[in-house]
Amino acid sequence: MTKTTAERRSESFADRAATIPRPVECAPWNGWIEVQTAGRIQLPPALAVALRVGPGALFAIQPLQRRGVLLRLYDDLLAVLSGLSVESRWSLVEAFLRRPLTALGPDGALALPREVLALRRGQRLLLEADDPHLWSRTLYLLRARP
């Protein structure tokens, strides 16, 4: 049975992501997205599954010279800390936490501070992801060239 638009909107992000089969191999992902709510981007559920992220996933935001932003996952930082000295661990955590942060909401959206990247409703952006099988899952959110 096909769901209506209202029914699909009422489903939670986690419910929609759960219906997507987990891939055995994931290629790098890229695609155009449209800003539905000013200041927020909707992470496509298929990409969230490929990246193994859900609500609450913490990202550091790194501006890319007015062209867009790079989003790095906190979980990836934690994964590399165990083999490092205490001083090195703190240095990496401190550098991560000094950046603006955002977390994936229960609806699958990421809020981005206006001073980092102003997003207006209807704006199209290129969302690219590194291969999720690499140690670092990085997202690039880039403005369309004029």
Image (tube, helix red, strand yellow):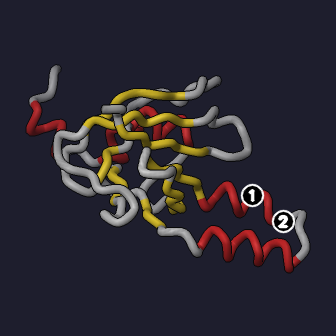
Residue position marked by numbered label 2 in the rendering? 82
Q: Reply above or below: 88 against 44.
A: below
The residue lying toward the viewer, choosing from 115 and 12, is 115
The residue lying toward the viewer, choosing from 116 and 5, is 116
Of the 4 image quadrants, the one containing the C terminus is top left
Give the residue drawn at x 71%, y 63%: 78
Could you tell whether 99 is left or right of 43 in the image?
right
Question: How far is disc 1 from disc 2 in space, using C-alphas?
Answer: 7 Å
Give the residue drawn at x 58%, y 55%: 73
**Residue 126 position within the rendered picture, expressed as x and y whole percent measured from the top left:** 39, 34
Callout 2 secondary element? loop
Callout 1 secondary element? helix
Of the 4 image quadrants, the one containing the N terminus is top left
Could you tell whether 132 is left or right of 32 in the image?
right
**Residue 138 position within the rendered picture, expressed as x and y whole percent measured from the top left:** 59, 45
The residue lying toward the viewer, choosing from 81 and 2, is 81
Q: Are marks 1 and 2 in contact (CB under 8 Å)?
A: yes
Q: Quadrant of residue 143?
A: top left
Q: Quadrant of residue 56?
A: bottom left
Could you tell whether 86 is left or right of 58 in the image?
right
In this view, the residue farthest toward the top is 1
The residue lying toward the viewer, choosing from 30 and 117, is 117
The kind of residue tagged 1 is Ala
Q: Reply above or below: 82 against 126.
A: below
Residue position marked by numbered label 1 in the rendering? 79
**Residue 115 position within the rendered picture, expressed as x and y whole percent measured from the top left:** 35, 66
The kind of residue tagged 2 is Ser
Q: Reply above or below: 134 against 23.
A: below
Give the residue drawn at x 49%, y 56%: 63
